[in-house]
Amino acid sequence: MDLLVVKKDGRREPFNPEKIRSGLFKALEKRPVSTELINLTALEIEQELRKAGATEVPTKLIGELVMRKLKRLDQVAYIRFASVYKNFTEVKDFEAALRELLETKKKR
């Protein structure tokens, strides 16, 4: 099934799994995570999107899935990705993300 990605401005473009893989590689640069695991994670995200059965997916959903996977995979990479995805502009944005991460860790 062909997926369309709905951008924030309403434009639609064909789903490109390479964009997910590229985002993961950037976030995980110089982190102790294998290329195989990064590729597997990208594939898992794509499968989750396709399993939902929708023909269109918003970029917000894709970003949230990537962040959820990164949070479990590598917390430094999660913060890196979140800082770009959520457009952090101040130190307090990082602090809030770190607090959330620590709270999540405590609950496990």
Image (spheres, grey):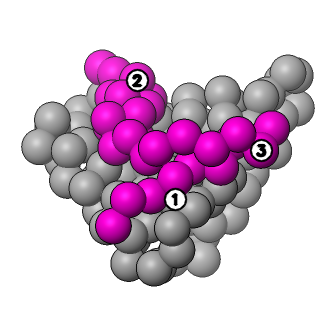
**Residue at the spot of label 1:** 65
Q: Amino acid at mark 2?
A: Lys
Q: Look at the image and give the residue range highlighted in magenta.
A: 1-30
Indicate the secondary structure of the residue bearing disc 3: loop
The vertical placement of 91 against 35, above or below, is: above
User: Does the rendering let one see residue 97?
Assistant: yes
Mark 2 crowd level (few <14, some 14–19, many ≥20, 10 Å Cα): some
Residue in the picture at 32% in, 35% down? 18
Label 3 or label 1, whichever comes before in sequence order: 3
Q: Amino acid at mark 1?
A: Leu
The vertical placement of 90 against 5, above or below, is: above
**Residue at the spot of label 2:** 26
Q: Is 70 left or right of 21, judged from the image as shown?
A: right
Indicate the secondary structure of the residue bearing disc 1: helix
Q: Is residue 38 magenta?
A: no
Q: Amino acid at mark 3?
A: Gly
**Residue at the spot of label 3:** 10
Mark 1–mark 2 Cα distance, whole angstroms, equals 16 Å
Mark 1 crowd level (few <14, some 14–19, many ≥20, 10 Å Cα): some
